[in-house]
Amino acid sequence: MEIIKFLLEISWKQMAIAVIAGLVSGGGNALMISLINRAVREGRTPNDLLFFAVVAVFIIATSIVSQYMLIFLSQNAIYSLRLKLSQNILSSPLEHLERLKENRLIVTLTEDVRNLTHAVSSVPGLCTDFATVVGCFVFFALLSPELFTLTVVSSVVTMLFVQAILNKAQILFFSSREEEDTLFKHYRAMMNGTKELKLNRSKRAAFLEKDLKGTVSKLRSLNTKAMKSFAVANGFGQMSQFASMGFILFGLPFFLAFQPGTLATYVLIGTFLALPMQNLLSKIPELVRGNISLRKIERMELSLMSLGESETIPLKVSPSCKLEFKDVVYTYQPELPELPPEGFGKNGHPPAHPEGFGENGHPPAHPEGFGENGHPPAHPEGFGENGHPPAHPEGFGENGHPPAHPEGLTANARPGSSPQEQRGLPNQPGRTGSGSFMPPPRPDENGFMLGPINLSLQPGELLFIIGGNGSGKSTLAKLITGLYLPQSGSIELNGKPVTDDNVEWYRQHFSAVFSDFYLFDSYLGFERDTLDQEVNGYLRQLQLSHKVSVKDGVLSTTNLSQGQRKRLALLETYLEDRPIYVFDEWASDQEPKFRELFYKEMLLNLKQENKIVIVITHDDRYFHLADHVIKLDYGKIEFDRVAQA
């Protein structure tokens, strides 16, 4: 099974020691049975008690060694897995993570790791039970070849039947695991959309009945069917043991002659064997779930690793920067092609005989994103009934244009052309220019294209990026900060092109507060003794000292209004003291006096410190303060004004 391979990859030496100790312990159990059998049949001898005590201590000691080694190994494996997954997520391109969907990542990090933990935790006991079973079968072989043969035949028939049931149960568990992604998606919608659901009774009722209840009901049905299959398998295993014992005791003596003591010994061993056999059968559901979760984790890990970014910094961070964009083009695809379901090939079809399935094995009944007929949905999420993306992106009016233009600027709207009409984009998937891996848009998908962008920024320059909702401002901010890489054109910092190999170095020149920022409750990465003193000084300047305090770099609270939280985020950018600052709608949640302070003092002070400052804003009353104003309209630069010196 994959779980055993997983443990062997962590440390085959520890696994070997644990297995050997477990087998020795199982052999000790068989020896104990022999000792008990001899005492019952032949009577006690003077040294029997001492021999019994030595064997008992030996069994306990070897069992403890085996379980200790496996516990240590299994917990180290889970520890390594959690860290590796987290590292892969942090090193994956932002655009890839955005398309994987948060709910899928959360399920992998929580449910899959939890299932695998339970499965791995059961391995120590399973090894001991398996060793005991092997020891008992060896004793059967020594006791009577005929009884051994019948017992083996009975066991093989039981295993074949249990395997047939497991094939069906595994399919159900596959489908159940795919459905958990959908359930977490609904949980996320419930938490993030609580306000909207409370304000609309009919929407709340429909969400509970149609979305949440439907998914939970399907999960209940799949898990119930799977667990029923395991119950049948467990019951058949018990029935097989009883039937074998009954035939050997009451039927076989009519055909073969046995000594009375032989049958008594068989009953003793068979009774002793029943407990480890039941333990093995009862652990099968956990092992199957863990096996499925491990496959999901490996697929997710492979998906993340295939696009992992280099984290090396080949050059020193420059204190003063010149930033240039040369014909930069970026096409945003709202969805990644669905990963094929577990066990499916690249063409979307299952292999003839999936791993762990019988000759008639089938893939999961309804893989994630597929309907009950096994086909992709006719209308993917966010697409219209004709199968195409919406004509008017979110925030755009019915005419396809962004909202009204800022006062005093040209209002010539120029809708962006489709990616297929642009030159210079790659025709095949791959890394081109300075960009990252990005498959070209499919023929039935328009996507959103930003560019071409030509831009040059000098130290001490203040740039305002303006435009309507959906015009590409935030996408441009992610390109500027290196979170996205272009598909064509080039970005240069101090004359050095930005590529996949040095993008980590490039990003270290930026401090940013995005519109969807996350506020950490501690100042990570600042190793200086004066940190608390600096933070307290900024808290007073930002008028937050009465709300928040800091001790050892940890904030007392982040439970503040959005405007106050943005001030705390701004504080961290000051501590970072990078050469380039990016603020995405920072002032939108500030009261008038702080908005005035931000534009007329904070930004100008950063300019005087020779920083490049990039501000996304709608505050047209402050446009005159900028050295450079760019207006975007559906991914195109509609207006580019540079202030005269």
Image: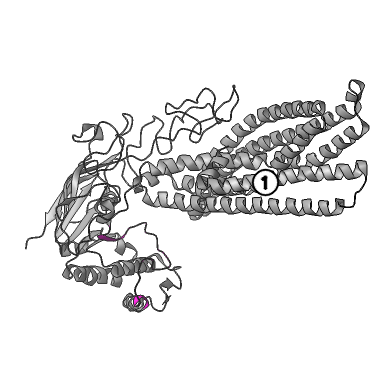
Q: Is residue 630 visible?
A: yes
Q: Of the residues shown, which amino acid type is indicated by label 1?
A: Gly
Of residues 225 and 34, which is closer to you in this image? 34
Quadrant position of the N terminus in the picture: top right
Badge 1: residue crowd in 10 Å (few <14, some 14–19, many ≥20): many
Q: Position of residue 473 (x, y in %)?
A: 26, 51
Residue at the limit of the structure toward the top, as seen here: 255
Image position of 151 (left or right of 86): right
Residue 300, above or below 551: above
State the residue at coordinates (36%, 32%). 388
Residue at disc 1, secondary structure: helix
Q: Is residue 204 visible?
A: no
Kindly identify which residue carries mark 1: 22
Q: Say how many tags the image has.
A: 1
Of residues 232 and 370, which is closer to you in this image? 232
515 part of magenta stretch: yes
Residue at the limit of the structure toward the front, as seen here: 46
Q: Position of residue 71 (x, y in %)?
A: 61, 52
Residue at the limit of the structure toward the left, as seen here: 645
Q: Position of residue 196 (x, y in %)?
A: 48, 52
Quadrant position of the C terminus in the picture: bottom left
State the residue at coordinates (59%, 28%). 357
Image position of 400 (left or right of 347): left
Residue 476, above or below 133: below
Choose top left, top right, bottom left or bottom right for residue 227. top right
Q: Position of residue 220 (x, y in %)?
A: 64, 40
Magenta-tinted stretch: 508-532
State the residue at coordinates (67%, 46%). 22
Of residues 605 and 458, which is closer to you in this image? 458
Would you say the magenta stretch is mainly helix, strand or loop?
loop
State the residue at coordinates (49%, 32%). 370
Choose top left, top right, bottom left or bottom right for residue 315. bottom left
